[in-house]
Image (tube, helix red, strand yellow):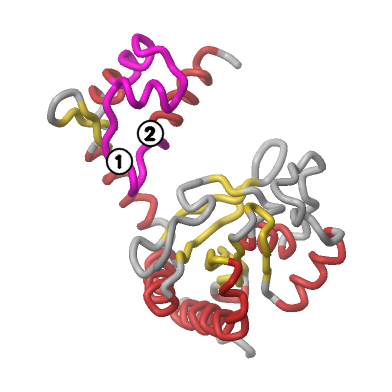
Amino acid sequence: MPRTLATVDSAVRVLEAFDADRTEWTLTALAVHLGEATSTLHEQLTTLTAGGLLMRVGRGRYRLGWRLLKLSSALYGSVPWYAPAHDAMNALARGTHLLAFLCVLEAGQDQAQVLCIARSVQGRDGPPVVGETDFVLPPHATASGKLLYALAGLDLPPDAPRFTPHTLAAPWPEEARRIRLDRLALTRDEWAVGTSGLAVPLVGEGGKVIAALGLSLPTARLREQERLTRRLRDAADGVAWTLGHRPGS
């Protein structure tokens, strides 16, 4: 990897270490987390702090800087569907007491990526679920990944790892056809035993798929699949209506 790209990649890894569950890091703890030498990481933190992307607080602790808020505001302002979708996601979480999330499909040089761009911060009962802090999701083992790949007519990565004995239990062409027909994706114990998922598409004006709205849940709660699917579809229909699309028209 060229030096410039490596430097950018390292900076991205540092910034991605911060999330809702870990808003602050010390140099030592972050170096262990990233597997970096403290001397190298200190230089990166100093550069990011000077650029306003990080701020130093307290005794050698770092937080995300205010400049990122400016950048995120510009991004959200350029995505008109994000606000209603985010509101629907949080309402869904409160109504189901489950982790709700929004995912998008981003084209890559080699393979499209499924990115989790938002997660509910309240409403969930029970212990953490697998992957709830991940940004890039495996398309073959998550409901949102399968949904977005199927609706885009994409093949799954040929080297997709099997996380559990249930991963990719059904042939992908057959499962993709079912997802396109039902407009619903379901995973059961495919990323981790005990964790399952449901996802439906969010569509904008003209019926274009813009994102996936999903729920992550303990597998035992799949007994509520019909009710949870109805809640998902109602939430997605509400977003579509706000954006000018009339479901069923």
According to the picture, the residue beneath numbered tag 2 turns out to be: 15
Tell me which residue sits at (29%, 31%) in the image. 25
According to the picture, the residue beneath numbered tag 1 turns out to be: 68
Range of residues picked out in magenta: 16-45
Q: Determine which of the numbered discs, if any, sits on residue 208 in the image.
A: none
Tell me which residue sits at (36%, 44%) in the image. 19
- Between 82 and 91, the one lying in front of the other is 91
**Res 204 → quadrant:** bottom right
**Placement of the N terminus among the 4 image quadrants:** top right
Tell me how many marks there are: 2
In the rendered view, does 166 fall on the left or right side of 242? Answer: right
Residue 238: % across, % down:
47, 82
- Between 223 and 57, the one lying in front of the other is 223
Label 2, label 1: how far apart the Cα atoms are: 10 Å
Residue 9: % across, % down:
49, 25
- Between 170 and 211, the one lying in front of the other is 170
